[in-house]
Image (cartoon, rainbow, N blue to C red):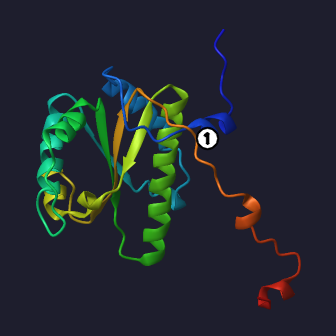
């Protein structure tokens, strides 16, 4: 009999995965996971997200673009063949894109909503045995990267999600006690104290 994980168990057990099995993740499954992920809270139902999935030959195209991006610019680094092959071995990629609103408060709300959507995506995938790495390196800011993958003017890449079945699950890293991160106000006079 299959046991269902609690939300707490999914949250506490999820890990960033850097090594994946060769098993493919189907487009149908990615769509199913995203269809759940978009139930993230988003102010006024703006749904500021968009997704670009790279599978099959599309993965090779993305890997070549990522390789070229790493090798150009101010902080260029050559990508050796081993790293390139590792990129090619990742079963699927989903680039998460956000519509950028020029108003700072709307931008912040939308960025938070897209981030919540990504976390939903990771959690529902983890529940089904699929791991992810949320990549936010300097590539996501490159105009040439945007142009080559179809990111439009007025859009921002929030992350490149590497997706697959985990080959190795890292151990949990300890979190700081909430006692060190929580301030409790029981009297407004406390706000003026140091």
Q: In this view, does 66 lie to the left or right of 174?
A: left
Residue drawn at point x = 73 percent, y = 59 percent:
178
Residue drawn at point x = 56 percent, y = 53 percent:
41
Assign a secondary structure to mark 1: helix
Nearer to me, 106 or 54:
54
Residue 129 spot, x, y in % from top left? 49, 25
Residue drawn at point x = 81 percent, y = 71 percent:
184
**In the rendered image, which quarter is residue 8 located in?**
top right
Residue at the outermost bottom position: 192
Residue at label 1? Answer: 11
Residue 57 spot, x, y in % from top left? 14, 30
**In the rendered image, which quarter is residue 48 located in?**
bottom left
Residue drawn at point x = 29 percent, y = 33 percent:
92
Residue at the outermost right position: 187
Nearer to me, 147 or 79:
79
What is the count of numbered marks? 1
Q: In this view, does 10 lie to the left or right of 69?
A: right
Compared with 32, 158 (above or below) is below
Compared with 109, 114 (above or below) is above
Residue at the outermost top position: 1
Image quarter of the N terminus: top right
Nearer to me, 193 or 176:
176
Residue 35 spot, x, y in % from top left? 45, 36
Compared with 2, 107 (above or below) is below
């Amino acid at each position: 009999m299959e046991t269902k994980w609690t939300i707490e168990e999914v949250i506490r057990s999820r890990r960033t995965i850097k090594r994946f099995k060769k098993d493919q993740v189907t487009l149908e499954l990615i769509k199913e996971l995203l269809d759940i992920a978009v139930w993230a809270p988003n102010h006024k139902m703006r749904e500021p997200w968009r997704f670009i999935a790279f599978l099959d030959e599309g993965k090779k195209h993305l890997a070549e673009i990522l390789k070229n991006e790493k090798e150009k610019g101010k902080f260029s680094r050559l990508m050796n063949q081993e790293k390139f092959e590792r990129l090619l071995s990742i079963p699927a990629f989903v680039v998460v894109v956000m519509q950028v609103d020029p108003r700072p408060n709307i931008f912040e709300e939308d960025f938070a909503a897209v981030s919540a959507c990504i976390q939903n995506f990771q959690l529902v995938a983890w529940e089904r045995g699929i791991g992810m790495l949320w990549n936010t390196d300097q590539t996501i800011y490159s105009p040439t990267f945007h142009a080559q993958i179809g990111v439009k003017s007025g859009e921002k890449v929030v992350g490149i999600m590497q997706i697959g079945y985990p080959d190795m699950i890292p151990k949990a890293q300890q979190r700081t006690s909430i006692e060190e991160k929580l301030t409790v106000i029981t009297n407004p006079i406390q706000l003026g104290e140091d």
